[in-house]
Amino acid sequence: MRNESTVEIRRLGSPLLRKSSSLKVWKRGLPLYLMILPGLLFFLIFRYLPMGGIVIAFQDYSPFAGFTGSEWVGFAHFERLFGEADFWSLLKNTLILSALNLFLFFPAPIVIAVVLNEVRVQWFKKFVQTAIYMPHFLSWVVVVGITVILFATQEGAINKALADAGFARLEIMTDPKYFRIVYVLQNVWKEAGWNAIIFLAALASVDPTLYEAAVVDGANRWKQLWYVTLPALRSTIVILFILRLGHVMDIGFEHIYLLQNSLNLSVSDVFDTYVYRTGVLQGEFSYTTAVGLFKSCIGLILIVIANKMSKKAGEEGVY
């Protein structure tokens, strides 16, 4: 009888015990939930709620009629985009700049992190880290302004020095052939050091005994780099590369717009500047929303493909 009563009490009490245990876990994690609450609210208000606005890509939107009163036009804005005379030029310029970012700018933080990881003099390492982080805090207005001051055709400091030395002046800001390399170099100078933080953090988590074992096996610095350091960075590189592919159509409006002028428009006009010129200055909100949706779809497709390829290659991917 005692055993049966005990079992019955346990049966009745088990839901209460589970509820009590859940409450304890919830209370213990409450400070963490409060810490992530601002981030969740940020994404909810500024990322997810505005997604509802993409419906105007399928409407002839009028601010006076609103979402419900505007006329539905189906895929008319997309048909107009693909039929525009500038579409292929915009697509070509955007993809070329994205490719330069992927293959020249993206590896730069990895190289910086690997080189800094090999520096053994701590004060020198911290000095270099601080020096390469600083440009991140400058606005693109300042960065482009510095470039103009240095490379202005007549009054630029470097062009004056070249002229005094008997060399031809460089038309950095106006000649279209210099635009792409200036764009990439400015990106590298401003952001490569800051982006290296992620890779330095990944290297900090590498077990030092792996390097010690490699030394015992006779590995020199290059072999330690190849067999220990780079494999430790591989997952981080793959994840960041996949995320970077999601922004392949987003070049960055501010940087391009500040570098753009009528002389280099043939290589500097991209979807971001086109959206500003057409959507903001001419008030064609529905059409430019369709352009933005087209860009987002391309980025989503690339992420899905790259994620599947990374999983087939044995990596974790982003989801």
Image (spheres, rainbow, N blue to C red):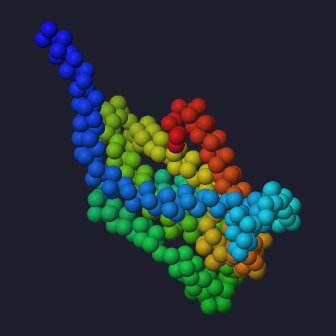
Work out whether residue 77 can be spotted: yes
The quarter of the picture where the N terminus appears is top left
Work out whether residue 178 can be spotted: no
Q: Residue 157: x and y, percent?
A: 57, 86
User: Residue 169 versus residue 71: which sits nearer the camera?
Assistant: 71
Q: Residue 64: x and y, percent?
A: 71, 75
Image point 50% across, 68% down: which residue? 190
Question: What is the residue that sits farthest to the top in this orientation?
Answer: 1
Q: Residue 255: x and y, percent?
A: 60, 72
Q: Is residue 69 above or below residue 19?
A: below
Q: Where is residue 7, by image quadrant?
A: top left
Q: Residue 231: x and y, percent?
A: 45, 39
Q: Is residue 148 above or below residue 76?
A: below
Q: Where is residue 232, by image quadrant?
A: top left
Question: How many marks can you see?
Answer: 0
Image point 57% across, 85% down: which residue? 149
Q: Is residue 251 left or right of residue 227?
A: right
User: Residue 97 versus residue 91: which sits nearer the camera?
Assistant: 91
Image point 84% across, 62% down: which residue? 80
Q: Is residue 106 left or right of residue 7?
A: right
Q: Is residue 312 above or below residue 34?
A: above
Q: Is residue 79 left or right of residue 34?
A: right
Question: What is the residue that sits farthest to the bottom in this orientation?
Answer: 155
Question: What is the residue that sits farthest to the left in this orientation?
Answer: 2
